[in-house]
Amino acid sequence: MTDRVYPNAAAATAANGAPAPKTAPFPATKSQLYGATRPAYHPQPHHRRRRSRSCCCSVCLWLSLTLILLIFLLAIASAVVYLIYRPHRPSFTVSAVKLSYFNITSSSLLNSKFDLNVSARNPNKKLVFTYNPVSISVFSNGIDVGDGVLPGFVHDTKNTTLLKTSILSKSHQLDSSSESTLKSSMKSKKGLPLEIQLDTKVKLKMGALKSPKIGIRVSCDGISVTVPTGKSPATASTSGAKCKVDLRVKIWKWTI
């Protein structure tokens, strides 16, 4: 029986004259076994961020276009209402003011009584005003010298309504600065300069349309009155009185 001889790599190289191919060692190592079956890692591109950004941009664009459209439609509706109804603000005039008494006690307490007549005019042909109760304050040099309330009323088209009320101040405590200012005005020949302020809310009715309530403030100045010395009330000078009507819109915590 003859033995078979297996030539090694060196013998094969010498016999053929060419280098023998490299062979992996046997048995294979763990790194070779796992490396053969593990797929190559290829980083994936990030598409989710791009998609989310594009979605946000689309939503913002549609919201902006919707808001612009609503503003445009509101402007058209306002223009149509204005052309149909030609709305104008109401006007107010102080027609008469009488001062029955005005005194300051030794304890710096103010007592006063004013009788006030105010004419409210609605110049509109198709617009009706509905007023809430009206709070009235009388000031002299910025000092509150009397307060009162008028009941609410409906102001019809092309109508002038006369409002009458009495404004009182009972034992109103004054600080030293206010007391000194009022006493100086009481002795003046020009008398007490007065400013009358009316605050209320009003609803507008235009045919079948009704607006929400809107705050208004009426400020009237150019009024002066001398302090009466007897039992007869003193009549104030109102020839130079002027009244201004301002809208007061409340936005969250602020009123403008």
Image (cartoon, helix red, strand yellow):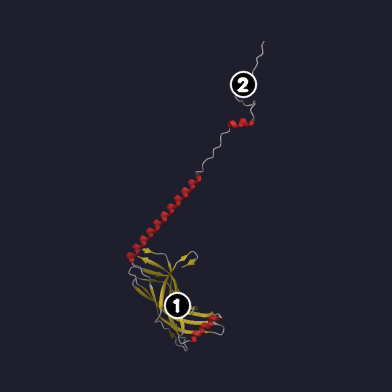
Decide: marks 2, 1 in contact (CB < 8 A)?
Answer: no
Side of 184 relative to 222 (left or right): right
* Count of number-bearing discs: 2
Location of residue 177 with respect to 83 vertically, above or below: below
Residue at figure coordinates x 45%, y 77% from the top left: 196
Mark 2 surroundings within 10 Å by alpha-carbon count, few (fewer than 14), some (14 through 19), many (20 or more) = some
**Residue 101, percent across and down?**
48, 84
Looking at the image, which residue is at 44% across and 83% down?
224
The front one of 128 and 82 is 82
Q: Is residue 207 visible?
A: no
Q: Position of residue 116 (x, y in %)?
A: 43, 80
Q: Could you tell me which residue is drawn at 49 percent across and 85 percent down?
A: 186
Question: Badge 2 is on which residue?
Answer: 13
Marks 2/1: CA distance?
Answer: 122 Å
- Secondary structure found at label 1: strand
Amino acid, disc 1: Ile
**Kind of element beneath mark 2:** helix
Can residue 112 be seen here?
yes
Q: Which residue is mark 1?
A: 196
Q: Which of pointers 2 and 1 lies earlier in the amino acid sequence?
A: 2
